[in-house]
Amino acid sequence: MPDQLKPLTVPDLREAKAQGRKLAVLTCYDALFARLLDGLVDVLLVGDSVNQVLAGEDTTLSASLDQMIYHARAVHRGSRESLVFVDLPFLSYQVTVEEAIRNAGRVLKETGAHGVKLEGGETMAATIRALVRAGIPVMGHIGLTPQSIHQMGGYRVQGRGPEAHDRLLADARFVEEAGACSVVLELLPAALAAEVTRLLAIPTIGIGAGAGCDGQVLVLHDMLGLNEGFAPRFLKTYAQLAGTVRQAAGAFAADVRAGRYPGPEHSFE
Ligand code: KIV
């Protein structure tokens, strides 16, 4: 590896918080985008949102471990500097701690990723502790946890009201004490996310959780404007690629139909 490349390490995440350096995280599901994003963001997150964004499912629930491993291996192949974290899919870690270790171990062994992400606070503390003890870095995920979407009744802001507020703070403490290296805070009031961020020594990575977090994560295809019609309040789109793709595909089809493509410059003698 050339000298100028300085791959991030998992301990660097905590160090970034200590130094007040904000962390940028984007989802990534393939080698092509990994090559484009590598080194620009701190973490490439192989989210189980791949099940919705690329596979067209309504929720993340049907994502499989093999599916996550397939995408994570591709992302690892395309990246050298950014950290790669992989979502453990629904039911790959909730049944027993042993199963969680085996499945998370598979992710690390078969993909080259640096760590896994899993959803849940207090209820997942023993699992997080066991994974970390086995040498597997864990990113927590609390607040809106999409794998519990039916129980939560929809994609709505969590942690509102005194009881939910205190529950969320307790969950954050459990995740940190169990040894997680960072934690995603999804769909929380900004003041609560900021309170969690002050409370923890590990970095908080927000999505729909305001500016007080130590870092931010967005789904790549959403922020590139590829996911038309998806416009939650927290999302900022940095490009409008859906229109660009449609325009290019339309121009190609028109050229083919009019006999303008291929031209002599695209043909062989
Ligand atoms: O699956 C995912 O992409 C995620 C992020 C949105 C945090 O969990």
Image (cartoon, rainbow, N blue to C red):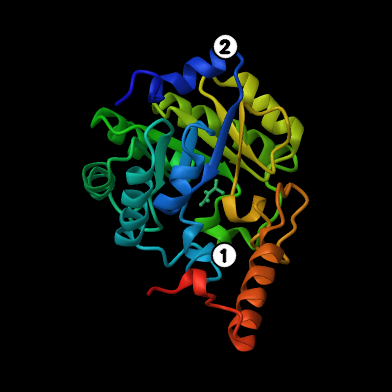
Query: Mark 1 Cα within 10 Å, few/some/many (few <14, many 20+)?
Result: few
Q: Nearer the viewer, residue 67 or 181?
A: 67
Distance, label 1 to label 2, CA atoms, is 39 Å
Q: Secondary structure at mark 2?
A: loop
Q: Which one is earlier in the sequence, the residue at label 1 or at label 2? A: 2
Q: Residue at x 36, y 36 (%)?
A: 128
Residue 211 drawn at (x, y percent): 73, 31
Question: Which of the 4 quarters of the picture holds residue 113?
Answer: top left
- At 33% across and 23% down in the image, what residue appears? 2
Q: Which residue is mark 1?
A: 150
The residue under label 1 is which amino acid type?
A: His
The quarter of the image holding the C terminus is: bottom left
Viewer can see residue 197? yes
Amino acid residing under circle 2: Gln
Residue at the (42%, 67%) spot, across then down: 62
Q: Which residue is mark 2?
A: 19
Q: Residue furthest front?
A: 269
Q: In this rendering, is residue 64 above or below 144?
A: below
Q: Tags 1 and 2 in contact by the CB under 8 Å rule?
A: no
In front: label 1 or label 2:
2
- Residue 170, position in %: x, y? 56, 31
Residue 93 in view, yes or no: no
Quarter placement of the N terminus: top left
Judge left or right: residue 132 versus residue 201. Answer: left
Residue 47 appears left or right of 245: left
Above or below, comparing residue 77 to residue 19 in the picture: below
- Spot occupied by residue 60 in the image (x, y as percentages of width and height): 49, 62
Depicted 32 relative to depicted 16: above or below: below
Q: Secondary structure at mark 1?
A: helix
Q: Is residue 217 above or below residue 191?
A: below
Q: Nearer the viewer, residue 83 or 123?
A: 83
